[in-house]
Image (tube, helix red, strand yellow):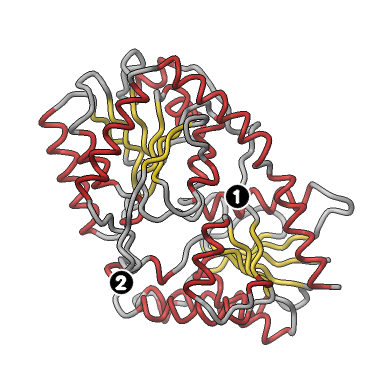
Amino acid sequence: MRVDILSREYPPEVYGGAGVHVAELVNALRTAGSPATEVVVRAFGMPRDEPEVFSYQVPAQLISANPALATLGVDLQMAEDAGGADLVHSHTWYANGAGHLAKLLHGVPHVVTAHSLEPLRPWKAEQLGGGYRVSSSIEKTAFEAADAVIAVSAGMASDILRCYPAIDPARVRVVHNGIDLERWQRIEEPELVRELGIDPDRPSVVFVGRITRQKGLPYLLAAAKLLPAEVQLVLCAGAPDTPEILAEVRAGVEALQAERSGVVWLDRLLSQRELSAVLSNATTFVCPSVYEPLGIVNLEAMACGAPVVGTATGGIPEVVADHLTGRLVPIEQLDDGTGTPVEPEKFIAELAATLTEVVSNPAAARLMGEAGRRRARDEFSWHSIAARTRAIYQELLG
């Protein structure tokens, strides 16, 4: 069985959870099970030297085009080259077009994994302009025609059926994201943390994520004003969607830095060792997202022994066990696809109160962190995720 995995992100060009998912899934499919699955990877970006991995760049004629059209230019090449695959599996709308076209062109099953949904990310119009209508159309067409749609959480499965009611619920399967516990584990390196500008002797709240509307950074910056003075806020945040959201976050960080010490913004991509050290040193990790299908970053924090304070939305409650591995912050959201809190000030106040509660009791926080690592180990291994994914492939192929 040869499976072609189609993705925008693949190492070393990984900047989000979808890219982590694809890399780990490919490795597990290739190494787990008997016989191991033959996997060919087709990804956006510069040439890579890994066997059976092929890279694709935007055609010269489309380099200056709307990003959605440039994406289609890559998709056409990937679809053509997928000839010979028994099945294609695409990740995110960027590669969904390639998967759908390969299905039609080569007559093979198409599996999509939903890492996010365009109808629930209307702020993407800020980035893509009219291209957002193009990306939404690509996703809708691919999802409705796919032979199977994998949701990374039960919350995501519900969102899929709500956004695309034409999909037969029997074609939607839940296969959670996973975590590599050998790669992600607690490391105590206070000097490395100090080199990054963080005081390892002060309590800290750590955020890791892209600068995008869905991650809820402006709410976190507002909540940070209400934290005890000794608490540090560490933001590992980069890859802004637009100059506008970057400017908004920069203004919020600078205002906060003018009011209190210990506000650290690391806007570069940290190495694995650096990020593990930061997460291991955290009194608590925070995920203030207003839209989060699952959140691999929460699993990474748990694997490093950090408790997670997360918004009770999307797939986060399927990862964070309230009062056991962290805390969930309730949120009532507008039903307009933006995820905006109905009462923003109430959400900010409850986020601040919950973070304060956790950082004020470091012993209890450490126990929640230890429980979080056990939960990550027992329920989110990549080998089990690869096995469930392979079973879907085999079912489709008969």
The answer to whether residue 166 shows anywhere in this view is yes
The answer to whether residue 73 shows anywhere in this view is no
In the image shown, does 67 or 28 lie closer to the viewer? 28
Residue 167 in picture, x, y percent from top left = 59, 78
Disc 1 target residue? 177
| 1 or 2: mark nearer the eye | 1
Q: Amino acid at mark 2?
A: Ala
Report which quarter residue 214 is drawn in. Answer: bottom left
Secondary structure beneath dot 1 equals loop
Q: Residue furthest right?
A: 34
**Is residue 52 shown left or right of residue 303?**
right
Q: Amino acid at mark 1?
A: Asn
**Is residue 114 shown left or right of residue 313?**
right
In the image shown, does 131 or 273 lie closer to the viewer? 131
**Residue 116 marker:** none
Residue at (18, 51) in percent of width and height: 248
Q: Quadrant of the N terminus?
A: bottom right
Disc 2 target residue? 125
Residue at (64, 58) in percent of width and height: 174
**Is residue 316 shown left or right of residue 153?**
left
Secondary structure beneath dot 2 equals helix
Residue 258 in picture, x, y percent from top left = 10, 31
In the image shown, does 356 or 250 lie closer to the viewer? 356
